[in-house]
Amino acid sequence: MSGNREYKSDVFSMLMQDKERALQLYNAMNGSSYDNPEDVEMVIHDGGISLSVRNDASFIVDARLSIYEHQSTVCPNMPVRSLIYFSVILSDMLSDKKKGTKSGKNIYGRRLVKIPTPHFVVFYNGEEEQPEVQELKLSDAFEKPTDEPNLELKCKVYNINDGKNKAIMESCGWLNDYMTFVNKVREYHADGAFDDLAIDIEKAIDYCIDNDILKEFLKTYRSEVTKSMQLNYEFDRQLELERADAIEEGLEQGIKQGLEQGLEQGLEQGIEKGANKMLFTLVTKGKLDIDTAAEEAGVSVSEFEKLMSEAGYKVPETV
């Protein structure tokens, strides 16, 4: 399995590659009524960066840049990730190396360089209970809070599970169909063994095709959808197991250290060690690339490799 995370929402990403679907979702999110798919300019950045720094869908309509992300797990770091996505996309837009289609923009010149207005959205469909809509802010991550941040980024998270954000789901038929498919997989695979997962996904695909739900898409990309959903489930299942083990071990270490150096400090250090163990394990098993793991741990790659080695984990060789 690839160590990057891009496969985690491949089905959503695949659906969003179609300009007509992208425009339909854009209209649903913005209350607009654009009807020409050619008004959509897909944004694809391939400047040699890691695949782990790719969001699910980016496109421009009427000088507005929509950066959409799909999540099946709760992630409070979406504003930070969105900032990285936007920076990479903007760098590509301003570069004169982008396939020779546009000349570079001189950001050092006297003329103001115009850029598309960004809009950051996350579509959440995980099984943890979450609000219908919530706003995450970059400033929430600042170590030293400030009432007037010099840099701010706001990211809206929309819960697209059953009964949530009905207006959006009714306005965007394919998004509603996507959730029908996801729910069918969950229904067929409820309490099922992992070995039966592929069979349950196939059953969900058959149900949707028979009921004209994403019919042509699922017929065309059946094998890709099956593989993507399998990887998605495996990633989330492994992450949950690692998280549970890390929390348990972290609490044990925290309590032990707390007796010696103060309970609060000990708990914090123990939980941090447990979380690092989860990251070490995912990297070792090839389920997470080391760059992303280091970012999650809040250290440089070299520091993360040192921590891995000191903890007795084998540091993967870089290609």
Image (cartoon, helix red, strand yellow):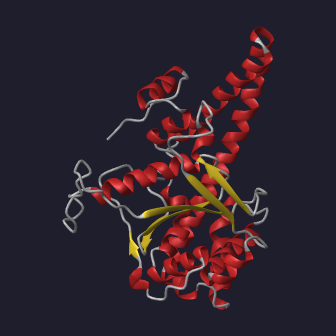
Residue under the image location 56 percent in, 81 percent down: 32
Residue under the image location 31 percent in, 41 percent down: 319
Q: Is residue 154 above or below residue 296?
A: below
Residue under the image location 59 percent in, 46 percent down: 77
Image spot of residue 179 (x, y percent): 67, 74
Q: Nearer the viewer, residue 83 or 162?
A: 83
Left or right position of 103 against 116: left
Does residue 67 appear in the picture of this structure? yes
Q: Nearer the viewer, residue 274 or 75?
A: 75
Q: Nearer the viewer, residue 206 or 113?
A: 113
Q: Residue furthest top?
A: 260
Left or right position of 232 against 183: left
Q: Is residue 281 above or below residue 94?
A: above
Image spot of residue 240 (x, y percent): 69, 47
Residue under the image location 53 percent in, 66 percent down: 227
Left or right position of 112 against 121: left
Q: Nearer the viewer, residue 12 or 281?
A: 12
Left or right position of 286 against 30: left
Does residue 204 appear in the picture of this structure? no
Image spot of residue 281 (x, y percent): 57, 37
Image spot of residue 273 (x, y percent): 64, 26
Q: Quadrant of residue 127?
A: bottom right
